[in-house]
Amino acid sequence: MVSKKIVLHFPSKLVDQPIVYKLVKDFDLQFNILKASVTSGEEGLMVLELTGKKENFDQGIEYLKSCGVKIQPLSKDVVRDEVKCTHCGVCIPICPTGALIVDPKTRKVIFHNDKCIACELCVPICPPRAMEVKF
Ligand code: SF4
Ligand code: SF4
């Protein structure tokens, strides 16, 4: 048996397709949705824990790829360098999970690590490169 946490990025044309259901029906996999959202560009984003026999797991992943779903393992973490962050707010609208928000009292940008799904969308757009991927 294999059990892995993965991030799925769905292009907008696949957002309303029953792709995850097919993982259960055709590949006998079990899943637990940890997070799901649709970004402003209408790309779907889902964090799944996927479990099943290794052969089925591999076939399920190949099926997802063949549908145009981008798959990213959730084995890394995104952290913020508090010294580099200038609280400019550029990262806020791009974060699909609300992990980056403005504190209404201080006007500073707060990073909620527990809400972060390590999708990396904020990493390249941060001007001082304060958001970093940790392996
Ligand atoms: S884009 Fe970078 S510098 Fe700006 S608030 Fe976000 S983490 Fe801080
Ligand atoms: S990596 Fe950045 S954009 Fe993605 S969920 Fe974490 S904080 Fe939000």
Image (tube, rainbow, N blue to C red):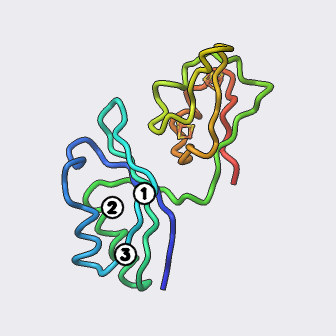
Tag 2: residue type? Lys
Image depth: mark 3 or mark 2 in front: 3
Q: Which residue is mark 3?
A: 30
Q: Does the CB distance between marks 1 and 3 fall below 8 Å?
A: no
Q: Report how far apart the C-alphas of labels 1 and 3 lie in the structure.
A: 17 Å
On the picture, is 7 further left or further right than 100?
left
Query: Disc 3 on helix, strand or loop?
Result: strand
Give coordinates of residue 38: x percent, y percent.
34, 39
Mark 1–mark 2 contact, CB under 8 Å? yes
Q: Secondary structure at mark 1?
A: strand
The answer to whether marks 3 and 2 mark residues whose Cβ atoms lie closer than 8 Å is no
Neighbor class of circle 2 (other Cα within 10 Å; few <14, some 14-19, many 20+) is: few
Residue hosting label 2: 65
Name the residue: 62% across, 20% down.
103
Q: Is residue 62 above or below residue 109?
A: below
Which type of secondary structure does the marked residue at label 2 adopt? helix
Instruction: Please rate how many residues cluster around mark 1, counting C-alpha atoms within 10 Å: few if below 14, some from 14 to 19, many from 20.
Output: some
Given residues 46 and 54, the one toward you in this image is: 46
- Establish if 63 lies above or below 122: below
Where residue 90 is drawn, which disc sits there?
none
Disc 1 versus disc 2: distance between alpha carbons? 7 Å
**Residue found 66% across the figure and 44% down from its top:** 133
The quarter of the picture where the C terminus appears is bottom right
Residue that lies at the very extreme toward the front in this rendered image: 105
Give the image location of residue 105, x and y in percent.
65, 14
**Residue 16 drawn above or below residue 128:** below
